[in-house]
Image (spheres, helix red, strand yellow):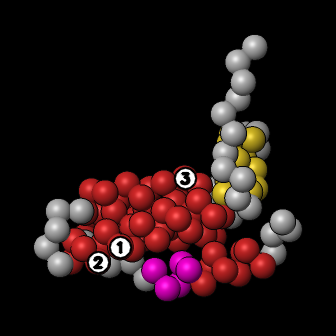
Amino acid sequence: MTEKKKCCKGRRGVIRNRKKSKPVRPSCLECVEKHLGAAWVLIAEHRDGYPHKTLAVGHLHEAEDESQEWPELHDSIREVRKEYQQKGEIPEMERLSLMIEEIGKNIED
């Protein structure tokens, strides 16, 4: 039998397929925070002229993927990713950080 790959040991929820309500993969708030933090740094570097837009978009997508257990956060990350990717609009990272902080208060360790 093949052993299933485990997620990090961060604060997790279970992602459910919104149509089938079947668990898809674990969701991890600490991973969301990690990917948003990486995207934040890369976006700042892109503004300074470094060619990091694609990397930033990738980290925003990973944060989006990891946040499916929390629909409001997931939808907000998806929205800022698309705006940054399509229009170059800088995401309101502080707002997303506050959302993560609020969700984290409600997750039992």
User: Is 91 contained in the magenta span?
Assistant: no
Residues at marks 2 and 1 touching, judged by CB atoms closer than 8 Å: yes
Residue 54 image point, x, y percent? 27, 56
**Majority secondary structure in the magenta region:** helix
Give the residue at mark 1.
41
Taking depth in this image into account, of 23 and 100 the one nearest to the observer is 100
Query: Viewer-nearest of labels 2 and 3?
Result: 2
The answer to whether 69 appears left or right of 109 in the picture is left
Q: Can the viewer see residue 72 in this picture?
A: yes
Q: Within 10 Å of the Cα at label 1, are there few (<14), some (14-19), or many (20+) other Cα atoms?
A: few
Report the span colored magenta: 93-97
Residue 70 image point, x, y percent? 68, 64
Residue at point 60%, 84% (across, down): 98
First in residue order: circle 3 vs circle 1: 1
Q: Quick one: which residue is furthest to the left in this view?
A: 49
Q: Vertical placement of 43 versus 16: above or below?
A: below
Residues at marks 2 and 3 touching, judged by CB atoms closer than 8 Å: no
The answer to whether 28 appears left or right of 32 in the picture is right
Local secondary structure at mark 3:
helix
Residues at marks 3 and 1 touching, judged by CB atoms closer than 8 Å: no
Residue 64 image point, x, y percent? 52, 59
Q: Can the viewer see residue 78 in this picture?
A: no
Give the residue at mark 3.
65
Residue at point 56%, 68% (across, down): 33
Q: Tell me the kind of residue under disc 1.
A: Val
Q: Tell me the kind of residue under disc 3.
A: Asp
